[in-house]
Amino acid sequence: MSTTTEEMQMLSFNIILHAGNARSHAMEAIALAKEYKFVEANKKIEQAEEEFNEAHHIQTDLLQKEANGEKNNITVILIHAQDHLMTAMTVKDLALEMIDMYKKMEAIEEANQ
């Protein structure tokens, strides 16, 4: 049984929701790291990961169904959802790098005092 267009739209909107939440948490982590609030920044990264897990669960389910021969109704909204997810993943990866960079900056500042 294939996923209906309506079901695909709901799944797509859920991917967008969770990806958007993950991206927001990652951006908040960057802002916190900029203030050298690394414990809080790491908590935001953990929240981002939780949101990614939700989005990935939906995505993996769709992939498994397709691998098992079920036809997926590919819509522009699904492509848009995938774009949101990939962009959010990139922001999270950059956030991790920036947190590390800010930790090094703090250490350098402390060493120069």
Image: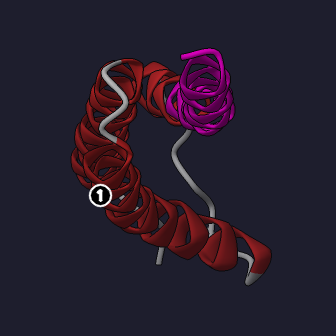
Q: Nearer the viewer, residue 23 or 83?
A: 23
Indicate whether residue 35 is drawn in magenta: no
Q: Nearer the viewer, residue 1 or 23?
A: 23
On screen, 67 above or below 58?
A: below
Q: Secondary structure at mark 1?
A: helix
Q: Is residue 51 left or right of residue 84?
A: left
Magenta-colored span:
87-113
Indicate whether residue 104 is drawn in magenta: yes
Residue 17 in which image quadrant: top left
On screen, 92 above or below 68?
A: above
The residue wearing badge 1 is 43
The residue located at (52%, 75%) in the rendering is 61
On screen, 43 above or below 113?
A: below
The residue located at (58%, 35%) in the rendering is 103
Query: Which amino acid does the dot numbered 1 rest on?
Result: Lys
Q: Is residue 90 left or right of residue 34?
A: right
Q: Position of residue 59 (x, y in %)?
A: 53, 60
Q: Is residue 73 left or right of residue 97?
A: left
Q: Position of residue 63 (x, y in %)?
A: 66, 67
* Secondary structure that dominates the magenta span: helix
Q: Position of residue 41 (x, y in %)?
A: 34, 43
The residue located at (26%, 55%) in the rendering is 7
Q: Nearer the viewer, residue 108 or 99?
A: 108
Q: Quadrant of the C terminus?
A: top right
Q: Position of residue 47 (x, y in %)?
A: 28, 58
